[in-house]
Each structure stands twice: as C-alpha cells, then as structure tokens.
C-alpha cells in the first residue's frame, strides 16, 4: 500500500486510529454513567492549559510545543474544570448541566483569550500550529507525538484491563459498588482522569471543540450491537479507530479539510448505520417487524369477518362478496391477496371463501377474542360493555400455550359473556 | 461614539439578549440544550450566508431559528427511539451538525472575512464599529443594531409570556392543565435561543455565546431566589462583565469576546463564594441547616445547665472532635457563647437562640 509507505501519512493514520481506540473505549463508561457531556467540558477546559503550558515553555526556554508539556498543561486545567463542576453541583442550587455549561464556556473563553494573546504577542515560528488544537489537524502530528500517545494509550488500557470489574460495577450500580467496600470516589476520579487523558490525546487530531463526539458517538454505536460491557468497550474502540483512520485519510485527500470534523462525521455515519442495521436493536428491523405484525393483524381481522358471516348463516365455506367484509372496506385489498397467497382464502369470481386452514385460523382468533372477554368478565369483574375493545387487541397477541392455559383456567367454557359460542377446531 | 464605546455597547447588548432566555434555560435544567443549539445552528448560518451574502440579515435569523428547532427535534427523536439516552443524544447530534458547518466554511468561504473559522470560535466584536449601515442619514453599526433589536424582542418575549414561562418552568403539569401548552412554550424558547445565538454570532462566535447564555443567569440565580429579580440582575451582571472584559482585552491585546466570557466566569466565582444567603462563605459562617441549629442549641443548653471547660464538655458527647470545634466556632462567631475554652458560658443571645430552636 502506498499510503503505508509514506511515513507522514503513516503517523497520521496511526495517531487518528489510536485516538479513536482510546476515546471509544473510555466513552462507553461515560455514556453508561450518563456523563456524555463531561467529555465535552473536559476538552474545552484543556484549551487554557495548552496555552499556559505553551507560554510557560516559551518563558523557560524549553520547546513550548513538546507534547508532554502541552499534555501536562491540558491535564491540569481539565482537572481543575472537573473539580469546579463537582464543586458547583454539590454546593449550589445549580444542577450539573448548568455546572458543565459554566465551566466549559468560561474556561474555553479564557483559553481563547490566551490563544489570541499568544498569536498576537508571542514571536517565533513555534506558535503556528497551536490553533490546530481547536479543530484538529492530524497532518501536524509528529512521530514523537505518536510515541507519547502510544505510551499514554498503553497506560489507559492497562488500567482499564486491571480494574475492569470495578469500573463495570461502578458504571451500572455505584451504590452496590459502595456496599461492596469499593473506594467509589477514588474509582470515579480515576475513570475521569483516564477520560481526560483520552481527551488530551485527541486534541491534536480532532481538536477541543469536537472531542465530545469522539467520546460519545462510537460508544453509542457499539451499544447497538451488544448488551455486554466487555464487548461494547472493545467494539467502541474499534469503531472509534475506524472513524479516526477513515476521517484522517479523507481529510488528507483534499486541502482545507480539517481532520476533526471529518472524523466526527465518519463516527456519526457509523452510528447511523448501527442504529439502522444492528441485529435486534436496529431501527430498520424493528420497523419491518412492526409492519409485518400490522399485516398479520389485518389478515386475521379479514378472516374473523368471514367467520362472523359464517356464524350468521351457518355456512362457513360460502363465497362472500368483498364489499360485505368490514376489514376490506378500508384499504384492505392487498390483505386479501396476502391471505390468498398464504392459502387462507380462495378467490372465487369477485368474492372470497375460507380454506380449511383459513377457517381454523379464523376460529382460533375468534376463540381468543371470546376467551379474553370471558377472562376479563370473570376475573376482573369488568362490565360487559368494557370487554370488546381490549379483546380486539389481545386476540392477535399472546402465543398458543398461553391461550391454552387461559382456556384450561376458565374450565374450557362453551360461551362468552355475551352468550356467543366459543369455537374449537375447524367447522370445515 | 468612539469605537470602544460601540464595542462595549455591542457586548452589553449581546449579554442582555442572551441572559433573558438564558435565565429560563438555567432554571429549566436545559443549559446544555442551549450549548447544543448554539453549535448546531452553524450549518444554517453558512447556508444562509451563501444565499444572502451576509451573516446578519433577516433570512439568516429566520433560517437559523428553524435550524435550532430542527436540532432540538433531532435530539428528541433520537432519544425517543430509546436506542440512545438523552445526554448522549445531545452529545451526538450537535458535534455532527457543527462539523458540517465547519467543513462548509473551510471548503467554500476561504478568504472571506465575514465568515471564517476564527469567526466561528470567537467572532470579532472589534469589527462592530466598521460594519456600518446607513439608517435615516446616520451611519449605524450593524451588529450593534441587530443585537439591540434582538435584545428588545427577547425582552418583549419574556414580558408577554412571563406567566406562561414561569408556570411551565416550575410545574409543567399545571401548565398543561390550565391550557398553557408547555410544549409550545418550550419550542418558542428554543427558537428564541437559536435566533439570539445567530444574532450574536459575528460578534462573539458560536461557542462563547454559551457563556453569555448561561453564566450571568447562573450567577444571578445564586444571588436571588426570585425570578423577577434574577432576570434584571442577570442582564446587569452580563453587561457589566462585557465592559470589564473589554477593558482587560484592550490592556493585554487578546480576544475581546474571550475576555468577556472570562469576566463572566469571575463574576460567577464571586457570586458562588460571596452570595449573601447561599454563598460558600455565608454557608461556612452560618447556623443554617436544621442539623447545625439543633446541635448548636444542644451545646448552649449543656453549657447553661453545667458550665464546664471544653475538654470535659467533649466527654459526655459522642461527637467527632471536628464537629464540636466547628459548632463552637459558629456559636462564638454569632456571639452565642463567650469566654476562653476553659470558661465557656452562653450569652443572653445564645440562650434566646437555644429557646427558639427548642420551640
């Protein structure tokens, strides 16, 4: 691959992938603990730290853009930000969301003031590139940045691996964790510190403004595919890495495409696909299931109409005109075709007739309806005029075994509360 | 008017325009929805800019207002699928929309002075005096005029819908019962927040507007318990911070909007520490909670019945030493007990206090 042969591009891709891996994995805990926006606040709060570190580096005569220096600054102010959020939420009437908003916007404002001050007042070629921390420019990654990122990533993953059980309990049930004697406060602080590291690692690639998405979006996407935390963390890491690599690649293809927004849009696309197509939770499958269910209910209502007409004049296999069927009068003609295709009715001229299979199914639906009316009337003492509406829905629900149990529990009755017979077996 | 005065006026108008809807955001626990909207209107601004060639025209205001409502709708829809929780929905939706806006700007408005990446981040309020508009023979600064109109509109909004806003904020069930349509009020407020964000955009940018929306109202909230006072107080604190921020920015030559946001942070910090009733300091110095009052009264009563030096006093009580020391310090500060540790005795005020608690 030619891209791999280019050392600059290799650095960029590795950096973006590593960032996605870290923020995706740690984001799972933030999402589960309903602290999605804490990452956003921490990212914004790290900007003044980066600027202060740069100023300190310039003043002391050390390389002001050394990743470790900037990292230390970012960690410091992100930490202060976190403590301020906790302090405001605990000691005032303001809620946590206001605390997050205040800390995020004020520290970012101070960061912007410092950044503009540096750009206007501090000389040297070094200051260029500092503004890349805002929207990210993966192309500005250097091999030494990558080394720092890799070491930090290793630390984060080792901690995550060693304390996985504790973090798991903490995320789902902090009260239970406390009752087990876990040091809940210290674990929370540790987990948030790991998040700060992930945020700081992402600063150069994605930038402070959009880091929130790199923490939350891969985790939200991974959640669609699995119910187990271990798998979710791994998957979120992989999806985040995929978004990072894909975004960095696209952004390097054209000029004036800042990496951060492209990476975020890749992650959002991954989330979109996951929301729609993930097995079981996918919205598409859910919509299909609902549509199929609605069709089944309509077909069963059609069969029920045929059964009622049969009850009226005693001939269950007579041909009925479509206009006599209530279920067909709306937009139900496709349902007739469906019932015919499933072998439930035969088409005769302009009318339909129940097949043996259709009659059995119709009998079952009518039986369910009347059993439920009887059940409500006997067990819940509902008056007779309150039974029908509920039964109209229940007759299509519940499975065979449950209906058998209800039937047995009522003593296999012969008639419903209105005195109509409860059908058993096919009349054909 | 001097350029500096125009800049301060513009910042103060932005602060007032933002604080009026911002108070309701803070009270409703929707501060972060304001954050989300202010980011998410960006693509709306950019698209409208392509159409109209300006970032502060009426179509842009209306278009971005619609975009803000769309954002809220999108967040609520995503949340309603029950696949993503509410806070995560916010954190997923607004960066995506913001990213689209940033990419559009990076790709298509290269070299345009009215709309570039810096402008998104912190606007450029220093240009306010340069962006003039002829109005009835006078040259008027356009951003100042736009923000003034929006501030006035927001004031009208709050005054006209004061009752509706108040009831739907504190008891949305009651609001629905008496026919006030809390959902409509909610979306109206979101629309106002969007329009205000857009109006402030070219002066203070899409991100710092959050500080203008939330911080002065939050500080005012700590200083008073009444909305009727919180609203004007928030406007006043916001406008004052804008002026102070400008002074700092001119002194050190940094982003004016950034310094204004920083000044708001300082104001908030002061309110947090020094608020008369709820501030950290007054909490530290007051017998405020029921528990503190009862413990204090117990101690006074004990001294009254059997005056004893401090070490003996501690013996009979199963309290932690810090609690004893703290309560004693509070009682001393209020003048309820007097004398050195060896000869503590309650004062008349202290005895009255203990009686009042006992009753």
Image (cartoon, coloured by chain):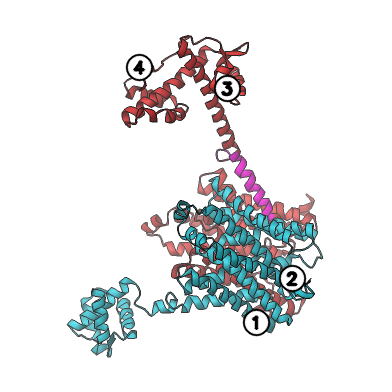
Q: Real-space Cα distance between discs 3 and 2? A: 64 Å
The residue where tag 1 is placed is B248
Residue B142's label in the rendered image is: 2
Q: State the hue of chain A.
A: red
The residue where tag 3 is placed is A328
Q: State the hue of chain B.
A: cyan
The residue where tag 4 is placed is A414
Instruction: Quadrant for residue A122, please give it.
Output: bottom right
B30 lies above or below B239: above
- Whole-percent x and y of residue A304? 49, 20
Q: Real-space Cα distance between discs 3 and 4? A: 30 Å
How many numbered discs sit on the rendered protein? 4
Q: Which of marks 1 and 2 is in front?
A: 2
- Whole-percent x and y of residue B169? 49, 60
Toward the viewer: A200 or B214? Answer: B214
Near mark 1 (Cα within 10 A), the count class, few <14, some 14-19 or many ≥20, is some
Chain ID at mark 3: A
Q: Which of marks 2 and 4 is in front?
A: 2
Q: Real-space Cα distance between discs 2 and 4? A: 84 Å
Report the residue at 73% width, 82% height from top.
B1
Q: Real-space Cα distance between discs 1 and 2? A: 24 Å
């Amino acid at each position: 691959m030619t891209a791999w042969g280019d050392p600059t591009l290799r650095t960029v891709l590795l950096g973006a992938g590593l960032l996605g891996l870290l923020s995706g994995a740690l984001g799972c805990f933030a999402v589960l603990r309903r602290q999605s926006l804490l990452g956003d606040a921490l990212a914004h709060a790290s900007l003044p730290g980066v600027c202060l570190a740069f100023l300190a580096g310039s003043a002391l005569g050390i390389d002001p853009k050394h990743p470790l220096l900037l990292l230390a600054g970012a960690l410091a102010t992100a930490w202060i930000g976190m403590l301020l959020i906790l302090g405001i939420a605990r000691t005032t009437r303001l809620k946590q969301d206001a605390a997050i908003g205040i800390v995020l916007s004020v520290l970012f404002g101070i960061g912007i003031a410092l950044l503009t001050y540096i750009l206007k007042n501090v000389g040297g070629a070094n200051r260029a590139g500092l503004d890349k921390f805002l929207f990210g420019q993966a192309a500005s990654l250097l091999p030494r940045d990558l080394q720092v990122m890799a070491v930090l990533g290793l630390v984060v993953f080792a901690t995550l691996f060693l304390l996985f059980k504790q973090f798991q309990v903490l995320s789902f049930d902090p009260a239970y964790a406390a009752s087990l004697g876990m040091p809940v406060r210290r674990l929370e602080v540790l987990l948030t510190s790991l998040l700060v590291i992930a945020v700081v690692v992402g600063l150069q690639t994605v930038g402070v403004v959009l880091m929130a998405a790199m923490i939350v979006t891969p985790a939200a996407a991974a959640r669609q595919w699995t119910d187990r935390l271990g798998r979710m963390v791994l998957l979120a890491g992989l999806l985040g890495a995929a978004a990072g690599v894909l975004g960095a690649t696209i952004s390097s293809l054209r000029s004036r495409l800042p990496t951060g927004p492209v990476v975020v849009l890749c992650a959002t696309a991954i989330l979109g696909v996951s929301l729609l197509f993930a097995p079981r939770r996918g919205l598409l499958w859910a919509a299909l299931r609902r549509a199929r269910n609605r069709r089944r209910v309509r077909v069963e209502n059609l069969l029920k109409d045929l059964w009622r007409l049969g009850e009226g004049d005693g001939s269950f296999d007579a041909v009925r005109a479509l206009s006599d069927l209530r279920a067909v009068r709306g937009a139900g003609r496709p349902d007739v075709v469906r019932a015919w295709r499933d072998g439930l009715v035969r088409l005769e001229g302009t009318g339909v007739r129940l097949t043996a299979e259709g009659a059995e199914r119709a009998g079952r639906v009518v039986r369910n309806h009347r059993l439920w009316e009887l059940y409500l009337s006997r067990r819940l003492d509902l008056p007779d005029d309150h039974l029908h509406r509920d039964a109209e829905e229940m007759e299509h629900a519940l499975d065979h075994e449950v209906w058998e149990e209800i039937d047995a529990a009522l003593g296999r009755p012969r008639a419903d509360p209105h005195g109509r017979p409860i059908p058993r077996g096919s009349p054909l | 008017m001097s350029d500096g005065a125009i800049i301060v006026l513009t910042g103060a108008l932005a602060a007032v325009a933002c604080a009026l809807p911002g108070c309701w955001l803070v009270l409703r626990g929707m501060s972060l929805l304001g954050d989300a909207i202010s980011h998410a209107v960006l693509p709306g601004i950019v698209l409208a800019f392509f159409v109209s060639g300006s970032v502060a025209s009426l179509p842009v205001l209306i278009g971005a207002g619609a975009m803000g409502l769309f954002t809220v709708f999108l967040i609520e829809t995503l949340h309603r699928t029950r696949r993503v929780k509410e806070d995560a929905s916010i954190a997923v939706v607004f960066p995506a929309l913001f990213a689209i806006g940033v990419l559009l700007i990076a790709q298509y408005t290269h070299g345009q002075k009215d709309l570039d990446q810096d402008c998104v981040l912190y606007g450029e309020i220093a240009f306010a005096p340069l962006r003039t508009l002829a109005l009835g023979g006078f040259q008027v600064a356009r951003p100042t005029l736009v923000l003034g109109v929006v501030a006035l509109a927001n004031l009208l909004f709050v005054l006209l819908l004061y009752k509706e806003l108040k009831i739907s904020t504190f008891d949305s069930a009651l609001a629905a019962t008496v026919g006030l349509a809390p959902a409509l009020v909610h979306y109206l407020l979101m629309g106002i927040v969007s329009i205000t964000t857009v109006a402030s955009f070219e002066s203070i940018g899409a991100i710092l507007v959050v500080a203008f929306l939330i911080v002065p109202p939050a500080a005012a909230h700590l200083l008073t318990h009444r909305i009727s006072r919180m609203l004007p107080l928030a406007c006043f604190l916001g406008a004052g911070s804008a002026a102070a921020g400008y002074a700092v920015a001119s002194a050190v030559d940094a982003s004016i909007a950034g310094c204004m946001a920083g000044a708001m942070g300082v104001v908030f910090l002061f309110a947090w520490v020094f608020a008369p009733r709820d501030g950290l300091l007054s909490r530290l110095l007051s017998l405020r909670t029921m528990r503190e009052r009862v413990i204090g009264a117990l101690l006074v009563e004990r001294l009254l019945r059997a005056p004893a030096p401090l070490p003996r006093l501690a013996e009979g009580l199963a309290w932690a030493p810090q609690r004893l020391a703290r309560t004693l310090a509070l009682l001393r500060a209020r003048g309820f007990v007097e004398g050195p540790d060896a000869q503590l005795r309650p004062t008349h005020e202290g005895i009255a206090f203990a009686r009042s608690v006992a009753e």
